[in-house]
Amino acid sequence: MTFKPNAIVFAAACALSICAAGLFSLNSQAADGTPQAQPKPALSVTTVQPQALAWPLQLSANGNVAAWQEASIGSEAAGLRLLEVRANVGDVVRAGQVLATFAAESVQADLAQARANLLEAQANALDASGNAARARTLQSTGALSEQQINQYLTTEQVAKARVEATKATVAVQQQRMKNTTVLAPDSGVISARSATVGAVLGSGTELFRMVRQGRLEWRAEVTSSELERIRVGTNVQVSTANGTPVKGKVRMVAPTVDTQTRAGLVYVDLPAGNALKAGMFAKGAFELGQTNALTVPQTTVVVRDAFSYVYRLNADKRVTQIKVQTGRQIGDRVEVLSPLPPDVQLVASGAGFLNDGDLVRVLEPSKQNTAPAQVVPAQAASK
């Protein structure tokens, strides 16, 4: 039997068509009859919704802590030896308290001499007053010439002037005696001491420096554009070196601005007995009121390439990366300035390990822990 070439080609084509149809039917059956493997979730996460809160509006600033007023306590006793120092740095003193004393022997001698001169001048004045009185009685009789009478009257006036001069000398010596004792001009805390026992000091030499009334203030540097937002009496929260907050109030806003830094000083009164010390650098915040803020937990926000993102959970359990702008941060919550739907579900935990479009498994909120049931011993149960 012989086959024609055309018949052979036709038979081969039919065989190929039958094979292709068989393969297509097998694939179709696998797609329709056998379920394909489901993709695995990339991560198990919890979700949270944004929460609207009334947050305080604050203005942060930096500055130095300084004394409200400092008093320089100096020596007014020139050329005297410092005999005793009764105050040291850190001592709390009251107004009028003795801080130091000078040796007063030479001043006592000068005072005694001045008093003796006063007694002598008073005796001479008394004698001159008697002579002048007699001269006045004889003025109309002609027993004394006009020149003699004028001489007695002039002597009387000179004697009285000498009495006044010696009284002034006594007052000067009494003041010198007073200056041998250095008194505190006001209540406060001694912040510096340069007095040394045995030193002979000149007039005006500083012995102590005192923080008046122990009052401190925070001098905050605020830019000129922000100064108008601050008013006298505004509450301020200043942080100490260890983070302890100290509450204060604005006492005064400087009327001028520094021409170099374009910043002005705001003087904030601080309460007594806090941990701040004069000369410390401190940070603080001015409380300017309250505003509504849309907040999310800090774990919800992911920072990548200097931008902030959150991940929205979709209905198909996949996440979508959304770029947001953040604002204030208080505690573990962050303000989101970008608009978000109020019912949006955001990934709260594990957001840092996700990428846009990842499939996730949503965990249910954890139930409150309960104490395990107490086990009754077998012997007790049998009784």
Image: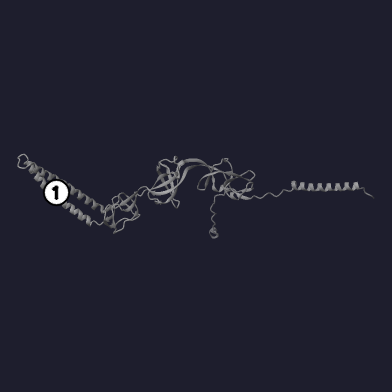
Q: Residue 261: x percent and y percent?
A: 45, 45
Number of residues whose C-alpha sits closer than 10 Å to that of mark 1, classed few (under 14), some (14–19) or many (20 or more) = some
Which residue is denoted by mark 1 in the rendering? Answer: 122
Q: Nearer the viewer, residue 154 or 66?
A: 154
Choose between 18 and 205: the one closer to the eye.
205
Task: Depth check: give the residue in front, 130 or 34.
Answer: 130
Q: Tell which of 347 and 127 is nearer to you.
A: 127
Residue 197 falls left or right of residue 20: left
**Residue 27 placement (x, y as % from top left):** 77, 48
Instruction: Farthest residue to the right: give it.
Output: 1
Residue 255, percent from left and from top: 40, 41
**Residue at far bottom of view:** 379
Q: Amino acid at mark 1?
A: Gln
290 displayed left or right of 359: left
Q: For the residue labelled by badge 1, is the local secondary structure a helix, a strand or a loop?
A: helix
Q: Is 190 placed above or below 51 here?
A: below
Residue 380 image position (x, y, % from top left): 53, 59
Residue 236 in which image quadrant: top left
